Amino acid sequence: MVMPFSKVTLLTLSELVRGMRILITGYPKSGNTWACRLIAEAAGCPFNAFLEDGELRGLWEVGAEGLERPSDFCVVKSHHSIEEITNYCQSNDKVIYVLRNPKDVLASALNYPWPESRLREFAKKKETYTLWEYLIREIVALIFWALRFFAPDNSLHLRLLGSILFGNVHGHKWLAKSWGEHLNGIENSDAFVLKYEDLKRAPIETCARVMDYLELDAGISQIKRSVDNQSFEKKKSGFLKNGETEKADFLSTGKIGGGDHKLKKIERWLIEKRFRTELSKFMYH
């Protein structure tokens, strides 16, 4: 029997996570939840946990599903950087890093219905600064002041942009590192780099490559079924039909190129200049 979403416990978590962990991480708003659901269904295992600071978090993760699937392994979501998650890996873990164009990451973050508790986290300020921190803070503040003439008059908008560009250790923990810093060490990592755009444009072929990396025998028919079941339209409709509005609100269409339409020219320019090396390396033009 499938346990109700709101009643899943840590005991259930410890029982389910007993074999290989498929750790799927990436910068926030990179499509991690969709990738977790899709890969878990294709692999025939549950997506049942969130890895935070080396500890598995309870199953209130809004994307968790497939708890009824019998398996000796599971999908675990995270937002740790490559360097961080490497430190938390166990011997039989497999790591998948979801990579998305940072302009689309920002566009997706701006579309997200942030709850009040998260907004308060973004508003946190450090009370004391070293001289160096103060100087950097003032320089960044000056940049943001100038951006007000080009970007929408929205402080959350500017904080999200600043977090992606420079990181923000004084705000939400998952945005402490910039988009580029989050990738540090990826060349020397054994992680499978899963480009969101590849998964979006060619989900069946890309998912098949993921299954090969995981050394799992998932047939094309099973992968096709997973892709269909995890489509935006089908998931949104199913959540609304079951009255799961929180899960429905969490979904977005995840368009490719959204940043080119939603962001101001100055914002696109800043991201392109700041991450020109990384964008070129991963063929983001």
Image: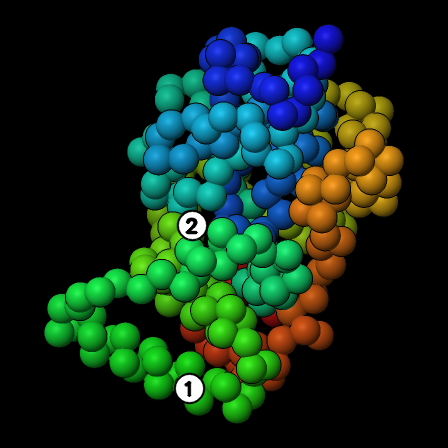
Quadrant of the image occupied by residue 51:
top left
Q: Amino acid at mark 2?
A: Trp
Place of residue 139 in the rendered image (x, y in percent of width and height, measured from the top left): 29, 82
User: Is 198 displayed left or right of 192 in the figure?
Assistant: right
Quadrant where the C terminus lies? bottom right
Q: Give SS at disc 1.
A: helix
**Which label is found at residue 174?**
2
Q: Amino acid at mark 1?
A: Trp
Question: Looking at the picture, does residue 12 appear above or below residue 142?
Answer: above
Question: Looking at the picture, does residue 219 appear above or below residue 27?
Answer: above
- Give the residue at the far left of this rendering: 131
Disc with the residue nearer the chain's start (1 vs 2): 1
Place of residue 135 in the rendered image (x, y in percent of width and height, measured from the top left): 21, 78
Quadrant where the N terminus lies? top right
**Which label is found at residue 145?**
1
Place of residue 270 in the rendered image (x, y in percent of width and height, measured from the top left): 48, 78
Q: Give SS at disc 2.
A: helix
Quadrant of the image occupied by residue 248:
top right
Number of residue marks: 2
User: Is 177 displayed left or right of 115 in the figure?
Assistant: left
User: Is 75 displayed left or right of 90 in the figure?
Assistant: right
Q: Name the residue: 67% across, 33% down.
A: 37
Depth check, front residue: 43 or 48 = 48
Q: Is residue 116 visible?
A: yes
Q: Residues within 10 Å of mark 1 (few under 14, many from 20)?
A: few
Q: CA distance from mark 1 to mark 2?
A: 24 Å
Q: Name the residue: 49% across, 26% down.
A: 58
Q: Is residue 177 visible?
A: no
Q: Name the residue: 64% across, 35% down.
A: 63
